[in-house]
Image (tube, coloured by chain):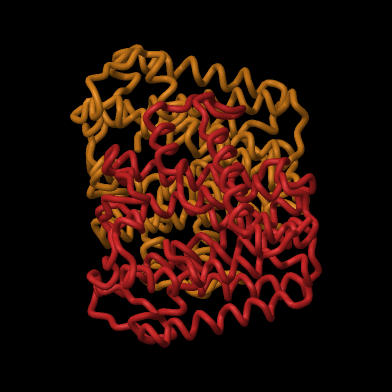
Chain colours: A red, B orange
Amino acid sequence: MNKGITDFPARLASIAAETEMLLKQLLGDAPLDGEIFRPARLTTAMRHAALDGGKRLRPFLLVESAAVFGAPRSGALTAGAALELVHCYSLVHDDLPAMDDDDLRRGRPTVHKAYDEATAILVGDALLTLAFDVMARPEVHADPSVRIALVAELARASGLGGMAGGQMLDLAAEGRFEPKRLSEKEIATLQAMKTGALIRFACRAGAILGKADMAALADIDRYGIAIGQAFQIADDLLDVEGDTKTLGKAAGKDAAAGKATLVAALGLEGARARLKELVTESDSALARFGTKADTLRAAARFVAERRT
Amino acid sequence: MNKGITDFPARLASIAAETEMLLKQLLGDAPLDGEIFRPARLTTAMRHAALDGGKRLRPFLLVESAAVFGAPRSGALTAGAALELVHCYSLVHDDLPAMDDDDLRRGRPTVHKAYDEATAILVGDALLTLAFDVMARPEVHADPSVRIALVAELARASGLGGMAGGQMLDLAAEGRFEPKRLSEKEIATLQAMKTGALIRFACRAGAILGKADMAALADIDRYGIAIGQAFQIADDLLDVEGDTKTLGKAAGKDAAAGKATLVAALGLEGARARLKELVTESDSALARFGTKADTLRAAARFVAERRT
């Protein structure tokens, strides 16, 4: 089934399209069992935040990791949609005036620009809540112990000691609360939390869905850490080298805001060298999975080399 | 064991103290398994938001409902702490300048006043996320299918078609987005979502923990709806009749903001009469449970008659 690296763009696009369809269904107008009413303003603003968006890298990694472990694709797609809802909520809240104050996201007005701040706060809250609703559904996996493990790991990756905590560190790193200059190690911790944790979860979730043994889970975890770091360094390089039109968001903004990045700490050449090491590390982590993991290998290269 | 109505204040205080202890443990400085690091600023701000707070009515109802169904108390207390985290997050976000813009909560500065807006947004996000982390833990119930049912119901009660949606309707009812005057029915829907859904969940969660049959769950659900409505009407009466010092928050603020309340729709006498009916309805819903439900009966009276 796996044709390896050559069909990578098609696989990425296909999972993005399937994720989009799922998200559209999840954000319909009709209330579900146990819901009382879906307010139109909130529902449409949630669609603005979650639909027509991005490469859907996290669902992609989740589905492809699940494929390595032989877990059914449909459950992985649903779990991927849940994960993407967490990612989308984080973008909406990070863009708020009190946070990074961004007007543009994927070339379109951010939620608080298209609607208003109060609506944007509620959009984020409701997307995050919906993520756990979706992850708990039987469509994800027939075995409730698998679903509860996914809920538990997703919560831990997203919260105080994960993504939300990472955003807190990022704000602190700007010197917002007190003068602050991060060491390379502190920047790595910040990034492991802010962007790394969800990407790592995506990879682990596939293994959990496939009821992988501990050793295999440890290897996919190593891969998840490596590709998460590669993603962040490539992102920081793009902020330095990219232009606003290609990115669909303001380029050079991180540097202007004095954000802590490894590119600032390592220099351009140092950052590019680190990216190469991370691709090697991801290959090494995937060694035991043979050709089944070819798409994950290609994903590491794609993430390291991406230009948008 | 159940000594009925006479020891009600002691039971309420005891569950509040046990909940406080659990919340304190949950919000410690040390990262848990799967967490990378707990940023001090975010952790202390989360404690500001969640500790030393309120009557802990939702955990109380959850624990007492669980007692009716013979579910172990310790699991119910943990589930109650998870539920309280959702309630605390909602207060932090509702208090934000873009939302209700409140400076005081329980007589203390709100989180965005004590810290800043960005921190308050992240505090809410991380409390909500932690709630699902806690609800997924084995301490709640040994059976993962019980925990996943609780996660699913909690998400649905809290999100787009529940609490978050209710806050959206409340903002719309102020005429913020377009001129708006709600009918009595629309106000009831708003309140069923904004405050009713979590209270109803508290009651249902006890039944789920006790693996109640469908008929018993339906009765506890009726009780949950009734006590939720009674809570909100009493709250609205307090806003009209109370004073700022006793409440620990600004009195008369709802009326000043043109908020939609049933007291405005029914008048003071009408609202008091409706409260009496709701106590009768809650007694009727509890009929099948005999003396085991005496504390829940007392809770309905307490909620209807509360003065703070």
Q: Is residue A179 left or right of residue B137?
A: left
Reply above or below: A289 against B281. below
Task: Give percent across and percent down for residue A48.
Answer: 40, 39
In the picture provided, is B66 more to the left or to the right than A71?
left
Which of the 4 image quarters holds residue A35? top right
Q: Toward the viewer: A250 or B195?
A: A250
Examine the rendering and report whether any part of residue B61 can be seen: no
- Asked if residue B158 is positioned above or below residue B291 in the image, the reply reads below
Q: Nearer the viewer, residue A271 or B114?
A: A271
- Residue occupying the far left of the picture: B256
Look at the image and tell me whether residue B112 can be seen. yes
List the single residue furthest toward the front. A6
- How many numbered callouts? 0
- The image shows residue B119 at horizontal and vertical percentages of 32, 60
Q: In the image, what residue occupies the spot 44% across and 72% down? A: A234
Q: B2 left or right of B101?
A: right
Image spot of residue B222 (x, y percent):
60, 23
Quadrant of the image containing the C terminus of chain B: top left
Residue at 44 percent across and 85 percent down: it is A185
Q: Nearer the viewer, residue A57 or B82?
A: A57
The N terminus of chain B, quarter of image = top right
Q: Residue at x 47, y 41 (%)?
A: A51
Name the residue at 63% across, 67% down. A298
Q: Tell me residue A153's x, y (percent).
A: 62, 61
